[in-house]
Image (cartoon, rainbow, N blue to C red):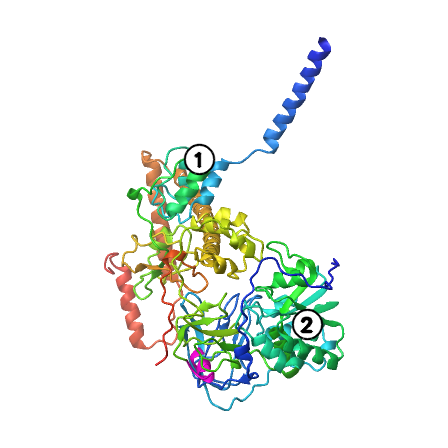
Amino acid sequence: MRRLMVSILEQPLKIPGGLSLASNKAQSLREPLRQAPIPERLIVPLSQHIGEAAEALVGVGDKVLKGQVIARSLNYISAPVHAPTSGTVTDIGEYPVPHPSGLKGVCIVIHADGHDTSAATGLAMDNVFAADAADIRQRVREAGIVGLGGAGFPTAVKLNPGPQRQVELLVINAAECEPYISCDEALICCCTQDVIDGVRIMQHALGATQVVIGIEDNMPRAIECLRDGLARAGSHDIRIVPVPTTYPAGGEKQLIYALTGEEVPSQGLPADLGIVCHNVGTAAAIARALLRGEPLISRVVTVTGAGVRNPCNLEVRIGTPMAEIIEAAGGYTDQVSRLLMGGPMMGISMPSDRVPVIKTTNCLLIASREEAPPPLPASACIRCGQCTDVCPARLLPQQLYWHAHAREFDKIQDYSLFDCIECGCCAQVCPCHIPLVQYYRFAKTEIWDQERQRQKADLARQRHEFRLERLEKEKKALEERRAHARKGLEKRPKAGDADAKKAEIAAALERVKAKKASQDAAARNIDQLTPEQQARIAEVDARRSGDGTAGR
Amino acid sequence: MLTATLALGILSALFGLLLGYSAIRFKVEGDPIVEQIDALLPQTQCGQCGFPGCRPYAEAIAAGEADINQCPPGGDSGIQALAELLGVDPKPLNAEHGVPQEKRVAVIDEQTCIGCTLCIQACPVDAIVGAAKQMHTVVAEECTGCDLCVPPCPVDCITMVPVKQDIVTWKWPYPESDTRPIVIARQA
């Protein structure tokens, strides 16, 4: 086993590039976290994160209980889905889902019965800190927990560094760097104990020797809560490091750099450095599942922006339509212009407010025209290089742009397109208003598509070659059979040989005679016959022994 | 003089042996350029290029018997890739061989199918399952959308349907073409 040495820096570093943005978090933190009402109708998508969609286990008309598994995961990189409340399944079909495409996805629709009756999940463990890591991972998987920070990668996979890797450092990401979003801060202040328990469970499951909570230094209340909580729990080995507030300091690779000075290799994983990074919300979800038996059926969502009357943080059941959450936050104001899922930098525009909240919905930004202005017409790049200065991944956004613009997908990968975290800093500073991130997203999905096409072509080639081989084999077999038959023909006498022909005819006649004789002598069912049957048999026999043609 | 001749002679004999050995030991089966061309072709096996499959077309290109613009499923990007590989100028697709179409997949109307097996024999990638006088069906994941099963069907029960885009295969549009409305529709 490899042991990697990583150490937490005394003084956290400033990330390369990045922007200082107005945080705009105060408005949603005015009141503490509260529960959003459970809606009458919940729409639960089967695919809520990176990886394969889950497979529905319930049918229309089935009664479900809160926390019951309603769809199971089929792959390693997948997560099951649970019923967010008790009620009846009224439909399984395609509904709009929160996805940039605006396409529909398969969802299970549940009509709540209002009782919110829980099912026995069997997820809770008696002594989780004595449990086997594999057992913990299994339960985390069964609880449907995915990374609640962003992309929603199944957490159980990230809790398994593999047998060849030793995890030295567990980084808990509480650096909520994007403006407007305050769900992690609200969660830390409200459920400090859950967060700390979850962190300790992850530390135990990973066998990490060091744990650090990376948090932005503009969240003093959350830092205070965590310090108090850790002191109460006596967890002095868990360090809290406030990192300088810069967007995007909360990116996984950026936070690791700020805390340790280590750079995650291009196309690599933090695990290559002996580091694993989890979101603070994920930690709380693990604690709830393993200590209280609650699967992931709700999450904290920041509802904010000038377009909503009462910005706040709400604990929302997965599957709640966005319109209901906005209603719970006081409804729209007159300034409403756009609905974004996520923050102003990385959020994606929603086609309608009827789409449901999913496991990765951290924020609903109901933006006014000033907050999310419509894109200005782009002009030609003037090569000012500002995008390069602000890129936190130290890429060359301008080069990426040229190649994406020209659809040169080979060349764009030479500039490490896939290390781009789509933070949007480059597009924000671009004086020509070029939608840079859109170009990168376009190039990424095109490259993935090409890869899929290539795989499909390889499969088709294989199958075609196999078919040709099979046809060849069949042809050969047919030829062999024919050759065999021809040999049989050759044994027979030639056409001109009259004597031989006569002999053959005689032999054939002989064969017919023998057959007839054997037919006559064949056993008959002649016991206990009525006279009538006897008479009919005699009649038939007479006909047969008479003229050969009489029977025809 | 004699030593030099001898030394050179021995050296050349040694190198000759080495070369001869390598020629046998590291012999390349087939023409590598054919492999490279074949890798760029879409493997639809549709025969629109006038050759019975992608590999024969690749061989014809390598032999200089066919042009690089005869593959409609490969489209302009395919021609571009071939031109780059072969160091020639790309040219527009030869319309004689057809026009590029969106991705499609064959679907058999199972109510109408009489189980004649003609489509099974036509399919270049064995993507149709069925037996004589039994209902046939297309394995959609294996289907290349080549259209070859459509003409032999005596009851015209095969249709080519465009492949529906889903969330997994969805691609971000090229930025300039993004004209989706951004203003939300408020619930009534």
* Residue A76 appears in the figure: yes
Count of numbered marks: 2
Depth order, front residue of A14/A279 = A14
The residue singled out by tag 1 in the image is B87
Q: State the image coordinates of residue A85 (x, y, percent, origin top left).
A: 51, 85
**Is A481 one of the magenta-colored residues?**
no
Quadrant of the image for the C terminus of chain A?
bottom left
The secondary element bearing badge 2 is classed as helix
Going by the numbered disc 2, the residue's amino acid type is: Met
Residue type at tag 1: Gly
Which residue in the protein does label 2 denote? A202
Check the residue under mark 1 and report the chain it is in. B
Numbered circle sitting on residue B111: none
Q: Picture quarter containing residue A176?
A: bottom right
Q: Residues within 10 Å of mark 1 (few under 14, many from 20)?
A: few
Magenta span of residues: A322-332
**Residue A300 seen from this side:** no
Q: Is residue A76 above or below residue B15?
A: below
Chain at tag 2:
A
